[in-house]
Amino acid sequence: MPQQMALNIYRGDCYHWTFTFWTDPDATAPYDLTGATAKAEIRAKPGSAVLATLTCTVVEPNTVEVELLTEDSAKLSAGKAVWDLQITYPDGCVKTLVAGGVTVTADVTDSTLVTA
C-alpha cells in the first residue's frame, strides 16, 4: 500500500515536496529509482477529470521532487480532492508510492470576484 500523505493547499500558492524512499525502517538502504519516471495528479475522486498535474523529477537513487506551480494551484476549487504519486520503471512496472487526500483552502488576495 502507498504511504499516506495529505496535501493542504492554499489556492494560488506554489508548493514543493521532496520524497525520499527507503527499503528499510532505519532509512539506510535507498529504494532504487534508477531509470524510473514519476507522475502525480490531483483529482476530485479516482477516475474523475484531472484538476492539476504536479511536476515530478526523479533524483537518483531514491528521491522524487514534486512541485505544484502557482498557476495550477490557482485553478483548484476550494474543497476536498485526492492525489497520488506513481513511479514507472523502465520495464513498464508501475508502483504507487504515496497517496492521500487534498484539502484546498480558498485564497483571499487575487481571488476571483464572487457575486451572490
Image (cartoon, helix red, strand yellow):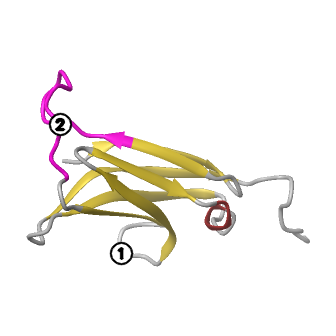
Residue 110 drawn at (x, y percent): 85, 60
Amino acid type, residue under disc 1 in the picture: Gly
Snapshot quadrant of residue 84: bottom left
Q: Which residues are magenta?
A: 19-33
**Gap between marks 2 and 1 measured at Cα:** 32 Å
Q: Residue furthest left?
A: 91
x and y percent of residue 50 in the render? 47, 74
The residue tagged 1 is 47
Q: Any magenta on residue 24? A: yes
Whether residue 81 is situated above or below residue 26 in the rendered picture? below
Residue at left 89%, top 68%? 113
Q: Residue at x 51, y 55 (%)?
A: 67
Residue lying at 64% horizontally and 53% vertically, measured from the top left: 14
Badge 1 density bin: few <14, some 14–19, many ≥20, Cα 10 Å: few
**Pointer 2 or 1: first along the chain:** 2
Residue 116 located left or right of residue 40:
right
Left or right position of 26 against 102: left
Q: Nearer the viewer, residue 34 or 2?
A: 34
Side of 113 relative to 58 (left or right): right
Residue of label 2? 30
Question: How many numbered discs, if any?
Answer: 2
Q: Is residue 99 magenta?
A: no
Q: Amino acid at mark 2?
A: Pro
Residue 3: quadrant of the picture: top left
Q: Does residue 39 appear in this view?
A: yes
Relative vertical location of residue 12 with respect to residue 24 in this rendering, above or below: below
- Frontmost of labels 2 and 1 is 2
Q: Position of residue 26 (x, y in %)?
A: 18, 21
Position above or below: 67 against 6:
below
